[in-house]
Image (cartoon, rainbow, N blue to C red):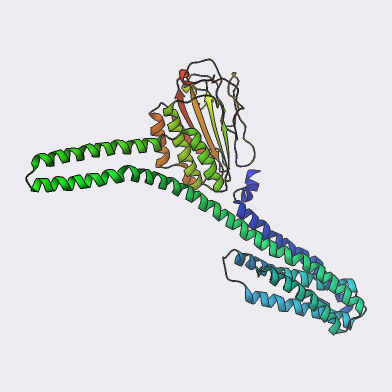
Amino acid sequence: MARLTGWWTRRSNPEKVELYTRWTYHGLAGVAVFVGALPALATASVVGPAGGWLFLAVLLHTVLVAVLCSRALSWQLGRRDRPNRLAAVVAALTVGGCLATLLLRRRWPDLDLQMTMYVVSGLVSWGVGALALCTTRVRHMMGLSVAAVAGVAVGTVLVGLPVTDTVTHTFTAGFGTLVFAPTSGFSGWLLRAVWELDAAHRIQARLAVAEERLRFARDLHDVMGRNLSVIALKSELAAQLSRRGAADRAVAEMGEVQRIARESQREVREVVRGYREADLHTELEGARGVLAAAGIRCRVDLRDADAELPAAAQSALAWVVREATTNVLRHSDARHCRVTVAIDAAGGPGAARGDGTGRDGRAVATPGGEAVGAAPVTGAASGGGAGSASVVGVGPASGTDGGEVVLVIENDGARPAGSGGSGLAGLRERLAALGGVLDAGPADANGRFRLTARVPLDGGDLRSAAAEPAGRGRS
């Protein structure tokens, strides 16, 4: 089923709206054939070959209007110039087709009024709807609609049709015009708004990254700016003292320079350490906000919320969240992302092997959220909906000491280029220093990507039992 629907699910929300809008107009072209072209062909039984020519004219009008709608939508999105020439051709063909139909009605009074009514209303409403797409001003759409309805009324009078024909043709044409013109104008406005909103989300995500860089730059500037200025002044003073023969004072000043330089190194390390050792909860909220700004639905399941993780584990997992969020933004077309953090009481020995059991033989959860083996699985979560695969569950609570914290991040829309990189290699090294592991790769053949990080814990560092049932997570 995923292969059959992939052409739709792999598209972004703006692309889906655009595809829906375009195919709506293609479908309306088929409706216009039934409403206007077939009744025109039916008139051939009364008017002879003239009915066949009218049918071809209406069919040509339908095709040109469909092409005009497609090009007008592209113009609305700024991808091409406004199709003025094609719009003029459609307008002329609309007027000519209506006049020809009214003249046939005048020439052959036996011609069914209902048939000519269908032809005229189809030409006017379908044509005006396409022309409305070629403008963005409401007053122009209203003026176009009023001019079309008035033109039908004036045309029936000039041709010499009776009042009944005038009222019938004017009313039906006016009804179709008042439906199609505002609908087309709203469709163009909605499509522009969706694409502009998507662009705003992407800009907001880039601004969030830029703001974080500026914050780090400000911290470095605050730390280094004053110290470097003092170092420069004292170095210049030491040089002048040395030239004047005051070697002792020059040495003292250079000693002060050395002290300030070491102090600067210490302060820079503190700034970098604070940046690297970010709080896990802060990074999770930051990831949710950045992904939401990019139009990606992000769900965070924080289980065992009362457990206090060691600072080293929090720092490492915070870096995993930060790097994974960057990869989702840069290397995927994700629409959904899910982050799960849980405590596995089975501990590091329970890391999954190829047969679904841990290194110690205990059962662990499979990527589908099912336990392999006799032991029950605590906190296994099943994914829901497209773009959110099943989340790796935590292992059984067998009463062993220690344990591990498991972080799982899944997203859809992964591109092949996003499955590797130096960032993941750096994360593996960071986790390996703590005895942890990191696995990353495609979750299935439908473009889902899963990153799993495991960091072992010391049982004494936990305030709550790791075997406590899951379900207190937040989303």
Q: Position of residue 169 (x, y in %)?
A: 85, 74
**Placement of 324 over or under 350, stated as above or below:** below
Question: What residue is at 80 percent from the left and 65 percent from the top?
Answer: 34
Determine whether, in the image, residue 368 is placed left or right of residue 238. Answer: right
Q: How many marks?
A: 0
Residue 366, percent from left and from top: 56, 28
Using the image as rendered, state which of residue 36 and residue 165 is in the foreground: 165
444, 397: nearer the viewer: 397
The part of the image, by quadrant, that contains residue 157 is: bottom right
Work out which quarter of the rendered image holds the C terminus and state it.
Answer: top right
Q: Nearer the viewer, residue 188 or 124?
A: 188
Residue at 44 percent of width and 25 percent of height: 310
Q: Is residue 61 above or below residue 217?
A: below
Residue 284 spot, x, y in % from top left? 51, 37
In-image side of 142 versus 463 (left or right): right
Which x, y percent locates residue 137?
66, 69
Screen quadrant of the N terminus: top right
Q: Is residue 41 visible?
A: no
Is residue 188 left or right of 149 when viewed as pictured? left
Q: Is residue 241 visible?
A: yes
Q: Quadrant of residue 429?
A: top left
Q: Is residue 102 above or below residue 441?
A: below
- Horizontal relation, residue 8 to residue 146: left or right: left
